Image (cartoon, rainbow, N blue to C red):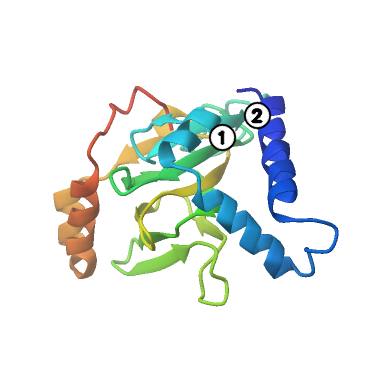
Amino acid sequence: MSRRGDYSFQLICFHLLMMRYCDRTSISSTAAFLDAMTSMASELSADEICSLLELEPNATCGFVRLTFLSKQTITPGGLPAPFADGRPLGSSLYFMVTPSAPVRLHRIRNDQLYHYYLGDPIEVFLLHADGATDRIIVGPDLRGGQRVQLLIPWNKFHTARLIGRRRWFLGASTEWPGVMPADVEIGELDKLAGQYPSIAAELRVIAASAQYVPPTEVVPR
């Protein structure tokens, strides 16, 4: 699907939402609009989302489609290691998490920003170099402390699982500089569980929930 196709899909969803749930007198508040949007999203299945957005199984992030890879590049030598061989300025992708397709334990060399779009929240575990950990919920409940964006700093191991009704999470990740396959490292479960005993059980549960994991080479992250 082209970028124009992505915009068309978003406009169609918005138009259908307005026709189905709203009239000139029914949108009296942002809350009413968001309720309508949530209702429409709840009718979508994970399979439908994969079909509409052309998502494919990914080695690290559930189901993914790359949506942007900058044509502008940073030339070799323009950045220090580990990017000294050159990189695109940035990249972005859709990703969907389901109960059987979590965000696997991994890290990338690049800074990245998670964005919440639709569906259930995800619980993200960040593993810091000093042995500390953070649990952060990325989802729509702002009053409940959830975030619609989450910065994951470069080279930080992380993993995530679906919570809430446990149907699906649809979001995006933007990265800078742009990600290349060499930037991705899958975490060693036993080693990291030993280094982070406070969340070792959760790391193992998330890893065990992945029912199908394609080889890293199948869909570059």
The vertical placement of 189 against 194, above or below, is: above
Instruction: Return the residue nearer the eye: 67 or 10.
Output: 10
Q: Residues within 10 Å of mark 2 (few under 14, many from 20)?
A: some
Is residue 87 found left or right of 189 in the rendered image?
right
Say what secondary structure mark 2 lies in.
Answer: loop
The vertical placement of 217 against 22, above or below, is: above
Q: Residue at x 25, y 34 (%)?
A: 212
Residue where numbered disc 1 is placed:
178
Q: Residues within 10 Å of mark 1 (few under 14, many from 20)?
A: many
The reply to whether callout 2 and callout 1 are in contact (CB within 8 Å) is yes
Instruction: Work out whether residue 169 can be spotted.
Output: yes
Locate residue 172: give its quadrant. top right
x, y (%) of residue 104?
31, 45
Residue kind at label 2, given as amino acid type = Ser
Q: Residue at x 67, y 26 (%)?
A: 5
Residue where numbered disc 2 is placed:
70
x, y (%) of residue 146?
51, 69
